[in-house]
Every structure is written in C-alpha cells, then in structure tokens.
Image: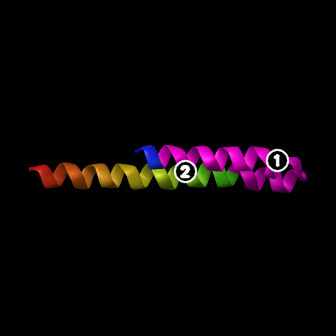
Amino acid sequence: MILGVIIIGATVFLSFRYLLKGPPFIKVMALGLVAGVAYLVIDHLIKKSKENKDERF
C-alpha cells in the first residue's frame, strides 16, 4: 500500500513539475499519465488484496 502511494505521488510530482511547463499537448499527456498510473496501481493493489484475502481462508 505504501509503495503504491509513493508511486502515485512521484508520478503526480514529476508530471506537474516538469511536464506541465510545455505546450498544451504535453499537458494533456501528463494528465493522462497521472490517471493511467493511478488506475494501474490501484487495480494492482485491489488484486493483491483479494489474493491475500483468499489465501487466509
């Protein structure tokens, strides 16, 4: 869980710090990058949580 928060936080930080200084096309790509990484990390954490829950029973 903590690793997921760090990954999402780093992506947001880097995209706002470096990528949003460019032209509008780059800004849209930066927002897409943040949304994509957040989705993938959260999806992975949910799958791991379900696997751990199934192993306990």
User: For the residue labelled by badge 2, is the local secondary structure a helix, a strand or a loop?
Assistant: helix
Choose top left, top right, bottom left or bottom right for residue 44. bottom left
Q: Main secondary structure of the magenta part?
A: helix
In the image, which is nearer the foreground, mark 2 or mark 1? 2
Residue located 74% across and 52% down the image: 30
Q: Is 20 left, or right, of 40 in this rendering?
A: right
* Residue nearer the viewer, 25 or 10: 10
Q: Which mark is residue 47?
A: none
What residue sits right under mark 2 in the picture?
A: 7
Give the residues drawn in magenta, as a range.
4-31
Q: How is the image coloured?
A: rainbow
Tell me the kind of residue under disc 2.
Ile
What residue sits right under mark 1 in the picture?
A: 20
Residue located 75% across and 56% down the image: 29
Tell me the kind of residue under disc 1.
Leu
Residue 10 at x, y = what percent? Answer: 62, 48
Residue 7 at x, y = what percent? Answer: 55, 50
Residue located 47% across and 48% down the image: 4
Residue 57 at x, y = what percent? Answer: 9, 50
